[in-house]
Amino acid sequence: MSQSFDIAVIGATGTVGETLVQILEERDFPVANLHLLASSESAGHSVPFRGKNVRVREVDEFDFSKVQLVFFAAGPAVTLSFAPRATAAGCSLIDLSGALPADQAPQVVPEANAEILVGLKKPFQVSSPSPSAATLAVVLAPLLGLLDLQRISLTACLAVSAQGREAVTELARQTAELLNVRPLEPAFFDRQMAFNLLAQVGTPDAQGHTLLEKRLVRELRQVMALPSLKISVTCIQAPVFFGDSFSMTLQSSSAVDLAKINAALEAAPGIELVEAGDYPTPVGDAVGQDVVYVGRVRSGIDDPAELNVWLTSDNVRKGAALNAVQVAELLIKDLL
Amino acid sequence: MSQSFDIAVIGATGTVGETLVQILEERDFPVANLHLLASSESAGHSVPFRGKNVRVREVDEFDFSKVQLVFFAAGPAVTLSFAPRATAAGCSLIDLSGALPADQAPQVVPEANAEILVGLKKPFQVSSPSPSAATLAVVLAPLLGLLDLQRISLTACLAVSAQGREAVTELARQTAELLNVRPLEPAFFDRQMAFNLLAQVGTPDAQGHTLLEKRLVRELRQVMALPSLKISVTCIQAPVFFGDSFSMTLQSSSAVDLAKINAALEAAPGIELVEAGDYPTPVGDAVGQDVVYVGRVRSGIDDPAELNVWLTSDNVRKGAALNAVQVAELLIKDLL
Ligand SMILES: NC(=O)c1ccc[n+]([C@@H]2O[C@H](COP(=O)([O-])OP(=O)(O)OC[C@H]3O[C@@H](n4cnc5c(N)ncnc54)[C@H](OP(=O)(O)O)[C@@H]3O)[C@@H](O)[C@H]2O)c1
Ligand SMILES: NC(=O)c1ccc[n+]([C@@H]2O[C@H](COP(=O)([O-])OP(=O)(O)OC[C@H]3O[C@@H](n4cnc5c(N)ncnc54)[C@H](OP(=O)(O)O)[C@@H]3O)[C@@H](O)[C@H]2O)c1
């Protein structure tokens, strides 16, 4: 006999929430009753699930004792307001907002640190990390045993959808304005995003690092269980709708064995290794897929201890919604 | 009495050549007669210079003894065919194609290694490096004395105009097709370039490095006179029309003095340092400007020996045409 679960998704009308509901259906997640929640703005709308339209309701009035598991995909403020109510009602939660500290709700990427779930107590509180950390962890996991890793240098080229629905609309609007030679009026972004690259996502601290960059370093270290790994990171905003891409250099202390690296990437779960000569792109490869695409695997131009890799994944799907559902699949195995 | 010179521009109808002619006019370069050359395809067209239309002629029939200086901006094949004829006629040359070896025509970036010109013999043969090397050299020059540089890690996000007129047209066409929901038919690029990032520019060698990446490393080392500097580089193609951008991490052996670094960047020629908190972008800042824009100057998140910088420049102007004209300005001082 297989068990099924009552589930809630908060932020069900958003970029991540909508995809999460789709993935629950696609993967035949054992859902008994599905509760879709959002703000008063879209309460009353409905979202399709298994051939039916499920009515969206306001999160404020929700009784969390009705469900065993809730996904938080509505921003940090909503998580901070409602996570205590959920756990008080005995409900386990998976948070996608990054609002909860790691000692309360550890970051989990199933391909990298699933074992951490075993030590948790009910009701479970788990964080699904930023799409960047989730994507990078999937690729770093099979490599760590093959390198004496000294440092990572990283440039993350993020899709505008990382900032939600409004950012997607704004890139489309700006592009159309420019192609039609109409005056450009930036709204969501503080300047022209179309055909441009923004070197900063969010406001930097006094040292010049953005919250996103610090979060990425913190989450990667926690997921990889390498608390003092040196990571240099620059997050930039690219004029791409969906799909984050990463240019990554790993520095080892001795020559990298590329044959072993390739074999490990080939064998690892959650990865599609693109053959040498070709390369993966966000649009055309990663978007809509359940794996991280990896390519351009090579050592340094004349440093054999350097490993260079390019990787790309669907930030909304593999980086967020799917990772959260994969965590849920592990939780329901015998834990929930 | 000020002297003036007879000048030829080969590739005068191209992306770089057109800008070069504009810059000769803007900077009041002492041109006596200007000869504009291209292929048979655009022979007969004309290009404006100082209020007159100058007729473009075929390079094949040109008599190089008519000029003292020629700019080569028509691709490596044209340089390899005609450079010997130019020098045999006693004509000095500045090549923008990268076709000539460094021992024949050293790469020169005036802000970084102008002194190399003094040792050259007439007729002069000088290379203006790839826009990436030219841009990076301008920024590295004032920093070298302040760092015990161990290695550089670099992700270069290149504009499509780096590949000439056809690439610019193709990005515009693809974008319009997508916005109008018409089927996309890639022509110049091998796949969708609009709203996408291509992780590879050109075909990689057996080790996975592209010609452009190897050229960048070779040119930077030559210009900076650091033949064994470790440089890891990934060149990607961004959906940006004009303006190259670079995410750069410099590794020093000891803590970086950020106040000194900022002061040096502030004082250096050819650089506009953007204040902390803000950041420079290709469109809006660099494009159309004569300087390299630098921002996001910061040490590592917790590595004080790391220096992170974001820089952007107009690849066609500062990275190519202007750099070549700046070299010419030095040559005519008392050398030519
Ligand atoms: N986009 C990504 O790539 C990505 C990836 C990983 C994690 N995340 C995180 O996931 C969360 C959602 O991001 P998103 O990109 O999906 O944003 P989004 O497209 O803007 O959607 C926001 C969702 O949250 C709901 N919401 C907003 N305020 C609410 C409130 N006060 N009470 C209840 N619901 C509220 C919205 O409902 P209404 O329709 O009622 O406004 C909507 O369903 C954020 O924390 C984000 O950082 C995003
Ligand atoms: N674009 C950049 O950012 C950049 C920067 C630095 C260096 N460069 C280098 O500069 C050179 C030109 O690049 P571009 O971007 O300006 O290219 P482009 O826009 O495609 O223009 C090419 C130019 O070369 C001429 N040409 C082509 N084949 C010729 C031939 N067989 N004989 C005489 N002229 C010929 C063309 O004349 P027609 O009009 O007759 O075809 C045109 O004037 C290349 O070597 C490139 O690598 C480019």
Image (tube, coloured by chain):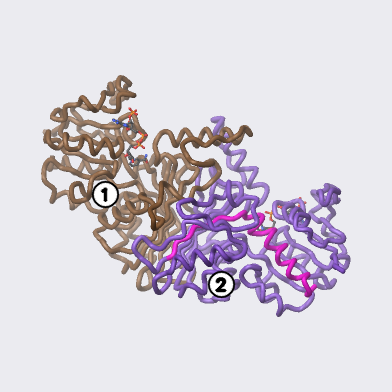
Chain colours: A purple, B brown
* Residue B51 in the image: above or below residue B111: above
Q: Is residue B72 left or right of residue A224?
A: left
Q: Secondary structure at mark 2?
A: helix
Nearer the observer, B221 or A139? A139
Residue A276 part of the magenta segment: no
Task: State the CA–CA distance, disc 2 to disc 1.
Answer: 41 Å
Q: Which residues are magenta?
A: A307-336
Frontmost of labels 2 and 1 is: 2
Query: In the rendered image, which residue does mark 1 sit on?
Result: B109
Q: Residues within 10 Å of mark 2 (few under 14, many from 20)?
A: some
Image quarter of the C terminus of chain A: bottom right
Which residue is drawn at the image coordinates 28% and 25% (left, top)? B50
| Mark 1 neighbour class, 10 Å CA radius: few under 14, some 14 to 19, many 20 or more | many
Q: Is residue B208 left or right of residue B23?
A: right
Q: Residue at x 42, y 52 (%)?
A: B235
Q: Position of residue A81 (x, y in %)?
A: 76, 65
Residue A313 is covered by the magenta coloring: yes
Residue B168 x/y as whole percent: 45, 35
Which residue is at 51% across, 63% downward? A209
